[in-house]
Amino acid sequence: MKNIMVVDDSKVVRKLILNILSKRDFSCIEAENGIEALEKLVANKVDLIISDLNMPKMSGLELVKTIRSNDLYNDIPVLMLTTETNENDKASCLEAGVNIYLAKPLPPGDLLGQIDSLLA
Amino acid sequence: MWKEKMVIENKEIFDDQEFYALRDYIYDICGIYFRLEKKYLIEDKVINRMNELSINNVSDYIYYLKYNPEKEKELSLLYDYITINETSFFRNKPQMQAFEEEVLPEMIKNIQQDGRKSIRIWSAGCSSGEEPYTISIILKDRLMLDGSWYTDITATDINDTVLGKAKAGIYTDYPLRNTDEKMVQRCFTKISDKEFKIEDRYKSGIRFRKLNLLDDDMISSLPLFDIIFCRNVLIYFDLNSKIRVLDKFYEMLKPGGYLFLGHSESLHGISAAFKLILFKGALAYKKQ
């Protein structure tokens, strides 16, 4: 079973994503910002991270930069799922090591398809 | 009558009100907080002790704890009942590896740049000594800090019983289960079939003392530290006590100092004063 971490400061958004993921056999971990995500990353095996970009305490971009600079975690795929459509933000994220950058809202089928491609 | 009640009513020994009274007293004296569903953790031991003292209600037991001439001894016993002292040498290997290979080299370099050759580390909640001795082994055996370095490890706990064990430095092979055999041979002397004693050179530089993490005055009497370990201690506290203890840790750390918590513990929602530093399989918190 693959473990997916969902990082978003909105509880509603996390629940929506978890609901989509429940259609498949994934085990899910929630975090409400980058700091909590790192704390849970150390304590759990994580196969994929779905993260929002703008979050308090530590943004999705900072989270990705931290993970990519760490030998143990740098190959975990990261899907950034955000309302930000600014091309500069997208470029920064992709340069930092985000694997796929997608705009919310996303049809459930599309999200699951992207997840499949990252976990393949 | 009390013992008969125990035999007849074997399951609900404390009613909820009795438990809350005891729970609130424990919280007031040391910040350790038990939720109702954790009643079972302390119920049997405390009830047995009350029987030994021929005390048949919690109010009288609390009175005994507060006013009896033997109250200090009784408090020591109570702390023994309410703290779980599960630990081992080199507990959480990734974290100790991060401490040895990442944090210490950084700290040592910074300390030397300041013109010092001393390092101060606090093992807060040291239990029976496995953690401070592990730190000492890393400093002296692994990093081989020579005699020109002053290493000071302050090892504190609220529980007299485990502090006594820590000072003795004698262990069975169970706490050594994460320690490789060559290190055991180098750092310990086998004193019986089942017992190992830590070599004196690893005891030197460690000061064991009794300390309640909510006693601000006592904590303020300590020096500032380069590194603080407080692993699997904060889990006993409620949010207010955690905030209080972490604020104190921040105050007691030198700038650039590190705080290590337990594997599943988090500062999330408790303190934003520290910066999270991620290592391989471990993390620590740094005072900026």
Image: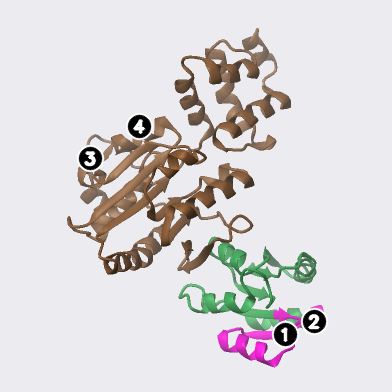
Chain colours: A green, B brown
Query: Residue beneath label 2, please?
Result: A106
Do callouts 4 and 3 mark residues in contact (Cβ within 8 Å)?
A: no
Q: Is residue B243 at all visible to an observer of this figure?
A: yes
Above or below: residue B69 compared with residue A31: above
In the rendered image, residue A114, in percent from the top left (x then y), is placed at: 71, 83
Q: Is residue B125 visible?
A: no
Q: State the image coordinates of residue B213 (x, y, percent, origin top left).
A: 49, 41
Residue stretch rendered in magenta on the structure: A81-108
User: Which marked residue is nearer to the observer: mark 2 or mark 3?
Assistant: 2
Q: Quadrant of residue A1?
A: bottom right
Q: Residue at x 82, y 81 (%)?
A: A107
Q: Nearer the viewer, residue B221 or B260?
A: B221
Answer whether residue A97 is magenta in the image.
Answer: yes
Is B91 displayed left or right of B173 in the figure?
Answer: right
Query: Which residue position is annotated with label 4?
Result: B164
Q: What's the amino acid at mark 1?
A: Leu
